[in-house]
Amino acid sequence: MRIFEKKGTVQKLKGHKQEICSLKWSPNNPQLASGANDGKIFIWNMKRSKPETRINAHTAAVKALTWSPNQTGILLSGGGNNDKMIKLWNTLTAKNI
Protein backbone atom coordinates (compact mmCIF):
# COMPACT_ATOMS: atom_id res chain seq x y z
CA MET A 1 0.00 0.00 0.00
CA ARG A 2 1.31 3.46 -0.85
CA ILE A 3 0.18 6.85 0.37
CA PHE A 4 0.48 9.42 -2.44
CA GLU A 5 0.96 13.15 -2.77
CA LYS A 6 0.98 15.07 -6.03
CA LYS A 7 4.79 14.87 -6.23
CA GLY A 8 5.10 11.11 -5.66
CA THR A 9 5.22 8.42 -3.00
CA VAL A 10 5.36 9.70 0.58
CA GLN A 11 5.49 6.39 2.44
CA LYS A 12 5.16 2.72 1.53
CA LEU A 13 3.37 0.58 4.11
CA LYS A 14 4.01 -3.18 4.20
CA GLY A 15 1.78 -5.55 6.12
CA HIS A 16 -1.18 -7.15 4.37
CA LYS A 17 -0.48 -10.27 2.34
CA GLN A 18 -3.79 -10.14 0.44
CA GLU A 19 -5.75 -7.45 -1.40
CA ILE A 20 -6.85 -4.44 0.64
CA CYS A 21 -10.63 -3.88 0.62
CA SER A 22 -11.08 -0.91 2.95
CA LEU A 23 -9.19 2.11 4.29
CA LYS A 24 -10.25 4.76 6.77
CA TRP A 25 -8.36 7.70 8.32
CA SER A 26 -8.94 8.37 12.01
CA PRO A 27 -10.66 11.73 12.59
CA ASN A 28 -8.61 12.61 15.68
CA ASN A 29 -5.24 10.84 15.30
CA PRO A 30 -2.69 10.38 12.52
CA GLN A 31 -3.87 6.77 12.11
CA LEU A 32 -5.06 4.78 9.14
CA ALA A 33 -7.09 1.57 9.46
CA SER A 34 -6.82 -0.97 6.66
CA GLY A 35 -8.82 -4.15 6.12
CA ALA A 36 -8.00 -6.92 3.65
CA ASN A 37 -9.27 -10.13 2.07
CA ASP A 38 -7.46 -12.12 4.77
CA GLY A 39 -9.92 -10.86 7.41
CA LYS A 40 -7.26 -8.81 9.21
CA ILE A 41 -7.30 -5.16 10.28
CA PHE A 42 -4.09 -3.18 10.63
CA ILE A 43 -3.85 0.16 12.40
CA TRP A 44 -1.05 2.31 11.00
CA ASN A 45 0.61 5.26 12.70
CA MET A 46 1.89 7.54 9.97
CA LYS A 47 5.20 7.97 11.82
CA ARG A 48 6.09 4.29 11.18
CA SER A 49 6.10 1.99 8.18
CA LYS A 50 4.89 -1.06 10.15
CA PRO A 51 1.40 -1.48 11.66
CA GLU A 52 1.17 -0.58 15.35
CA THR A 53 -1.86 -2.84 15.88
CA ARG A 54 -2.91 -6.06 14.13
CA ILE A 55 -6.38 -7.48 14.65
CA ASN A 56 -7.54 -10.89 13.41
CA ALA A 57 -11.01 -9.60 12.86
CA HIS A 58 -13.22 -11.60 10.56
CA THR A 59 -13.58 -14.98 8.83
CA ALA A 60 -13.94 -13.21 5.47
CA ALA A 61 -12.69 -10.01 3.86
CA VAL A 62 -12.98 -6.77 5.85
CA LYS A 63 -15.28 -4.80 3.54
CA ALA A 64 -15.99 -1.72 5.66
CA LEU A 65 -14.25 0.37 8.33
CA THR A 66 -15.24 3.53 10.17
CA TRP A 67 -13.87 5.34 13.22
CA SER A 68 -15.96 6.77 16.03
CA PRO A 69 -16.13 10.55 15.58
CA ASN A 70 -16.58 11.01 19.34
CA GLN A 71 -14.19 8.57 21.02
CA THR A 72 -10.51 7.99 20.25
CA GLY A 73 -9.48 4.44 19.36
CA ILE A 74 -12.93 3.04 18.58
CA LEU A 75 -13.29 1.34 15.18
CA LEU A 76 -16.24 -0.42 13.57
CA SER A 77 -15.55 -3.16 11.00
CA GLY A 78 -17.77 -5.14 8.66
CA GLY A 79 -17.00 -8.57 7.22
CA GLY A 80 -17.87 -9.93 3.81
CA ASN A 81 -20.38 -12.55 2.62
CA ASN A 82 -18.91 -15.53 4.48
CA ASP A 83 -18.64 -13.56 7.74
CA LYS A 84 -21.69 -11.23 7.80
CA MET A 85 -20.56 -9.66 11.10
CA ILE A 86 -20.16 -6.07 12.24
CA LYS A 87 -17.68 -5.70 15.08
CA LEU A 88 -16.69 -2.86 17.38
CA TRP A 89 -13.02 -2.61 18.40
CA ASN A 90 -10.94 -0.80 20.96
CA THR A 91 -7.80 -0.28 18.87
CA LEU A 92 -5.76 0.74 21.91
CA THR A 93 -6.14 -2.80 23.33
CA ALA A 94 -6.95 -4.65 20.05
CA LYS A 95 -10.00 -6.17 21.74
CA ASN A 96 -13.54 -6.61 20.49
CA ILE A 97 -16.03 -4.58 22.51
Image (spheres, grey):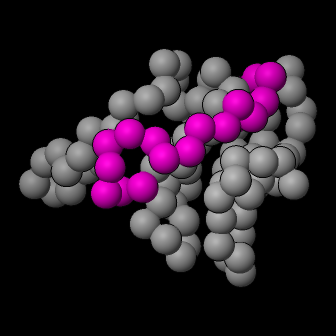
> Of all residues shown, which one is farthest toward the front?
93
> Of all residues shown, which one is farthest toward the bottom?
70
Residue 33 locus on image (x, y percent): 55, 50
Q: How many marks?
A: 0
- Kindly tell me whether residue 2 is visible in this rendering: no
Q: Residue 54 colored magenta?
A: yes
Q: Main secondary structure of the magenta part?
A: loop
Span shown in magenta? 45-62
Q: Is residue 96 left or right of residue 61?
A: right
- Asked whether 87 or 93 is in front, the reply is 93
Residue 45 locus on image (x, y percent): 42, 55
Q: For the point 63% across and 23% down, which residue is it?
A: 37
Q: Is residue 29 left or right of residue 78?
A: left
- Kindly tell me whether residue 11 is visible in this rendering: yes
Q: Is residue 26 left or right of residue 39?
A: left
Q: Is residue 41 shown above or below 37?
A: below
- Asked whether 71 or 66 is in front, the reply is 71
Q: For the point 71% across and 69% down, which residue is it?
A: 68
Residue 11 locus on image (x, y percent): 24, 46
Q: Is residue 28 shown above or below 18?
A: below
Residue 96 locus on image (x, y percent): 83, 48
The quadrant in which residue 55 appears is top right
Q: Is residue 73 shown above or below 15?
A: below
Q: For the point 89% across and 38% down, which residue is it?
A: 85
**Which image quarter holds the C terminus?**
bottom right
**Which image quarter holds the N terminus?**
top left
Q: Residue 59 colored magenta?
A: yes
Q: For the point 55% across and 55% down, which residue is it?
A: 24
